[in-house]
Image: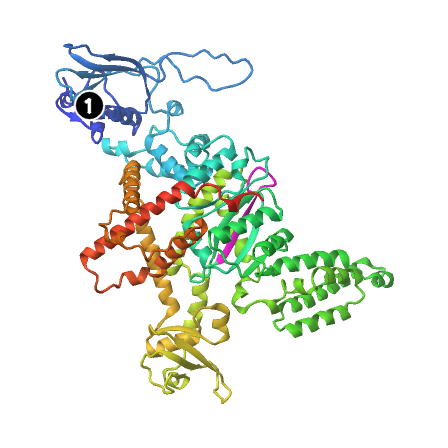
Amino acid sequence: MNQQQQHNELRVYTIQNVRYALAHSLIPGVLRMVPNQPFHVIVSEWKECLAHISELCSVRWVHKRRTNGTEGGRVVYSETFYCHRAGSYDTQRTVRTQKDSKKCNCSGVLKVTILTANSTECKFELLADHDKYTPGDEEDVKTLKLTAKTFDKMIQQLQEGRNCRDIRISLLHQFDSISDVPLDDITRAAQSSAGHRKVNYNDVYNQMRKLKCNLFEFHDNDMFSVKTWLDEHLANNGYTIYSGNISECTSFHDIFYFGFVSSRQLTYLQQSTSVCMDATHNISSRINDVLYSIVTRDRLTGVGQPIAYMFTNDQSAYPIGEWLRFLREMCGLTIENLTIDCSIPEVNAMHLIYPDANIHYCAFHVLQAWNRNLGSKVSLESLYERYPDRRHTDDALQQYRGDMLTVLKSIMHEQDIDTMYNKVNEFKRRFYEQTEFLSYFETYWEPEHLIQRWTFAFTDPRDRAYLTNNMIETWFNQLKTVYLRRVRNKRLDRLIFILTNEVEFYFINEHERILRNNGRMGPLENQQSRRRYRAAQVPVRDISAMIQNPEGGNASDPMTGFWKVMAFVPQVTRSTPRYEITVNSEMLIKSCTCLDFSQRRAPCKHMYLLKRYTNMQVHFEVEQRNALRQAAEAVTLRHGELNNRHAVPRHVLREQQQQQQQEIIIIDGDDEYDADDSNIDILNSTQDNLQFVSQTFTSFHHDRTRVLEIPTITQEESQQYAQRVRELLLFHEEMMRRHHHRRTANTQRH
């Protein structure tokens, strides 16, 4: 008996050290089992050890026979495995070519035994070695499965949304990086990739096909899968569902419309009054399917944020109007200014749901429409008669059309209403010969209700960021380039998965990144840095002369009221304007009367100069820090007790909620909260009750910072307070799960 055999019989191996029971083979980096030299492993890990040994030895063992021991026998359990290349196969091919069979009549046999004498150990013994091939050589590797480590990495990257080609390249790089590991001992050989098969594209693709059924494809019928998304997955994760008419549809050949809003988007939606709306095509294999999005500008970062989605194959005004009605009545969306492309259905839907809202056409799309019609409706017949050379005539015509477009741009950009109308009249007098284009202009662009939609003169200065649809066009480009990778999406359930997982995750983290100023500055922070720089460049000796406190002096002591800051000019005169800056009761610099602040609603250089002079904080920056803290708290809450679905079983939560409801309903006269209900308003209407609940949650939101500063509350009171809020949250979650995914009267077809 040699030293290795003695060592194997005396030692019991585990999954961590079972490699030491093996020996080197003729292939560098590939280990092997020694025939007729058994070794023992812990019985609870024998299957894991078998899989690990198979990878280390570059073999596969196929189950052949299993034996359960009899009572009083010496064997508790035994199992015999044959090599995966055992036996033979005679091809039946006639015309179609295929690979040669991996079967080569290999004699390798492995036996696993658990003895009665020691049932805590499992004996591995190679009864017959591989005799028809060499495990791990170039001819054999192609017949093996992928290793468990490669398989796990593949699954992880698929769940992260990477495509098949990128995953394959990534795994091949990792494969090559570990193929250079020195193979001089057992440990390093176990870490190498020698004897393992490299991943190919079909490996990744086939696994993706299996995985997608767990991720997003819950039914072969795309419509049924979408219903599962809306009724179960999104409804249980805090999404506000617009069911539309999805319950009436059985396939995507029917007219459908539905949408959803996440809890994060709902916060933006309730705070926004100016938004963009547009639709993007080519979102599925069906040509009529479109995705409508509403995008607003995050006032703390300056980044466009998609805040609502709707899917439909009906591009008329009706589904848009029903969607907007749902967002207004169920989500609290108030639209004062809407920027759209020149879309008549969107205009009609807005007039129906938001009749008082201002509609603005995207400047880019207006210029695009003008340019097309200039090309088709403007001509110079006299030039063709005067100049026979066609090339010179075409150049002159192109220059003429360019002059007309330049004048039209000047009309659009004019901010004074009277001057704008004068320019319109001048345009018509100057180009009076172009009767066809002027007729088009007077019909579709000049009427009073239409001219207000595309000229800057009728736009609120605070909405200058919405003069074009750039934010929503950027969002659609990001969706199709980054997330869909410019590959045609085939199913809507996959797009829902991308929007609710990858897109939502990105915007949450991007918002936090910009607020932390981590990496590249956001668009708003870029503007603010220039204004802080301008304020920092003012010489110290000049600051006191530029600033006047509310008492009329130059003292830099913080105080509330209206401060006056002089305009930044090279030379001060009597006519140099002074801007009024408001400092609120919390000693925060709130606003300024300058044009820059009125247009951007973000701190100007005058506010930063006052901050530098008095050391008072800017209210806008305090809001940014509060938003950052709330984002951190939201992450903690998502991982905390209230969202830990595994901490408390669902049936226990349901029993607790039912018990709490009974405690609230039953009045026994002993509870101090039930003894006097004279202050409780009984509302008869369901909508009134829901409105009361909505207003209550709004009040909770506004009191979130005041709660942390209650000075006189005792520990017992704080515990009661927290317990009541927990009960409210549990009851609220139960009501949302029970009713929110169902259809309401607001989503029915009228």
Which residue does the image show at 25% across and 33% down from the upper left?
Answer: 184
Q: Nearer the viewer, residue 716 or 687?
A: 687
Res 284 quadrant in image:
top right
* Picture quarter with the C terminus: top right
Left or right, 337 with respect to 676, comes to right
Q: Nearer the viewer, residue 320 or 22?
A: 320
Q: Position of residue 60 (x, y in %)?
A: 33, 21
Res 174 quadrant in image:
top left
Residue 745 lies, with reference to residue 6, above or below; the image says: below
Q: Position of residue 570 (x, y in %)?
A: 48, 83
Q: Position of residue 4 (x, y in %)?
A: 16, 23
Q: Dot 1: what SS? A: helix
Give the residue type that dot 1 points to: Val
Q: Is residue 659 inside the magenta stretch?
A: no
Residue 477 in sight: no
Q: Nearer the viewer, residue 350 or 276?
A: 350
Q: Nearer the viewer, residue 724 or 404?
A: 724
Residue 197 lies, with reference to residue 430, above or below; the image says: above
Q: Is residue 284 inside the magenta stretch?
A: yes
Left or right, 501 with respect to 1, comes to right
Q: Which residue is mark 1?
A: 43
Q: Position of residue 150 (x, y in %)?
A: 35, 33
* Picture quarter with the N terminus: top left
Query: Which region of the structure is painted magenta?
Result: 283-296
- Which scheme is used to colour this image of the protein? rainbow
Check disc 1: other Cα within 10 Å, few if <14, some if 14-19, many if 20+. Answer: some
Residue 9 lies, with reference to residue 431, above or below; the image says: above
Which residue does the image show at 39% across and 41% down from the upper left?
Answer: 738
